[in-house]
Image (spheres, grey):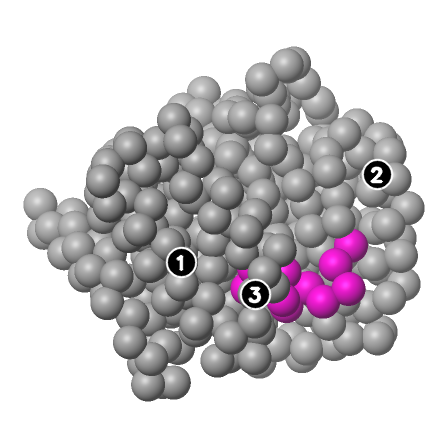
Amino acid sequence: MKILILGAGGVGGYFGARLLQIGADVTFLVRPKRAQLIKKQGLIVETPNERIQLDPKLVVAENLEDDFDLVMLSPKAYDLEDALKTVSNVPGQPIFLPLLNGFDHLQLMDDQFGKDRVMGGVAHIAAVLTEEGVVKQLNDLHRFTYGTRHACQEPVANSLDELMGSVAFESVRSPNVEQSLWDKWTFLATLAGINTLMRANIGEIVATEFGEQVTKQMFDECCFVAKNSQYPISEKTQAQSLGILQKPNSDFTASMLRDLESGYKTEHEHIIGSMLRRGRALNLSCPSLQLAYTQLVIRENQRLHH
C-alpha cells in the first residue's frame, strides 16, 4: 500500500516516521522549503526516549505524479481548505484519512470527495515542530485511531491493520470512528476551554475550591451536545475523560493554551465554536463554553489588530 502524508509536522511527521521505521511505503508531500531542510538533515524525530533520523521520500505539490492508495492529512483546522486544494490533485482515486480534531471537517471532505473516500481518524499525541525543523514528541502518549465510514474502505483499512501490527505507537481500529471523534472532541473542547479560560494547567485548576466543579460543568455541556447530536458519550469514556480533566497535580494542557500564550492563531472556532453552534442549533444552553469561546475570540481579534 502506498501512503502519502500531507506535511511532516508534529502529527504527520511523527506517525509517518514510525511507519517508515517498519518499512511502510510512505511519501511526504511538503512545501519546497521543508523539502530542502529534510533533504539536508533528514527527517528528525525526538521522543522522550530516543532520536530518530530518516531519509524519507518527498514530493512537492507541483510534482504529484504517482498514484497513492491512502492520503493522510493532519493540518490545523484553519488550514484545511488549503490542504484539500493540494491533495485534490493526487492522481488516482485514493482514500483520505484526516487526523483532525472536531467533526466539521468530515462534512467538508465528504462534499468534496464523497463519503466513500473519506475514512475517520483521531491522533492522540503532543508533538511540535521546532524552529530547527525537528519533530519533537512532548510525552509518551502516541495513539492512532482509525476506522471506515463506508464498506469500500475495508481493503485500505485492512492493509493499515497489517502495518499497525508492528509499529512503535499504539493503534486502534475503531468499529465506530465517528463516535471516536466525538469522544475526543468533548474531551478536547473541555480541556482547551478550561485551560485557556483559566490560563492554567489541570493541576492548578483543580487545586482551587471550585476547579473540579467548573471543569465538570464544561464537560457536561459538551456531553449534552454530543448526546443530542446522536453521539452519546458512554459512561466509561466520560469517566476516563474526567479522570484526566480532574487529575490533581497534573501539568496537562491543551496545545491551544500553548498557541494562545505564544501569540499564534488557535483552533478555537473548530473545537469550541463549532460545539457551541451545534448546541445552539439544538436549543441547548452552554454557558461555560460560551465564556471560554468569547475570551478566545477577543484574544484572536487583539492578535489580528496588534
**Quarter of the image where the C terminus is located:** top left
The residue pinned by badge 3 equals 233
Quick one: label 3, few (<14), some, or many (20+) residues within 10 Å?
Answer: many
Badge 2 density bin: few <14, some 14–19, many ≥20, Cα 10 Å: some
| N-terminal label among 2 and 1 | 2
Residue type highlighted by circle 3: Ile
Q: Which residues are magenta?
A: 173-183
Distance from Cα at disc 3 to Cα at disc 1: 11 Å
Q: Is residue 12 above or below residue 75?
A: above
Closest to the camera, between mark 2 and mark 1, is 1
Please name whichever residue, 35 or 266, is drawn nearer the observer in this view of the structure: 266
Residue at image mark 2:
24
- By secondary structure, the bulk of the magenta-drawn segment is best described as helix
Mark 2 to mark 1: distance in Å? 39 Å
Gap in Å between the C-alphas at discs 3 and 2? 34 Å
Is 105 placed above or below 135 here?
below
Residue 130 location in percent, x, y?
44, 25
Q: Which residue occupies the extreme left position in the image?
A: 306
Q: Amino acid at mark 1?
A: Phe
**What residue sits right under mark 1 in the picture?**
219
Percent coordinates x, y for residue 60 in the rendering: 60, 45
Which callout, 3 or 2, points at the residue further toward the start of the chain?
A: 2
Instruction: Examine the image and state in which quarter residue 210 appears.
Output: top left
The residue under the point 17% across, 55% down is: 295
Mark nearer the viewer, 3 or 2: 3
Q: Earlier in the sequence, mark 3 or mark 1?
A: 1
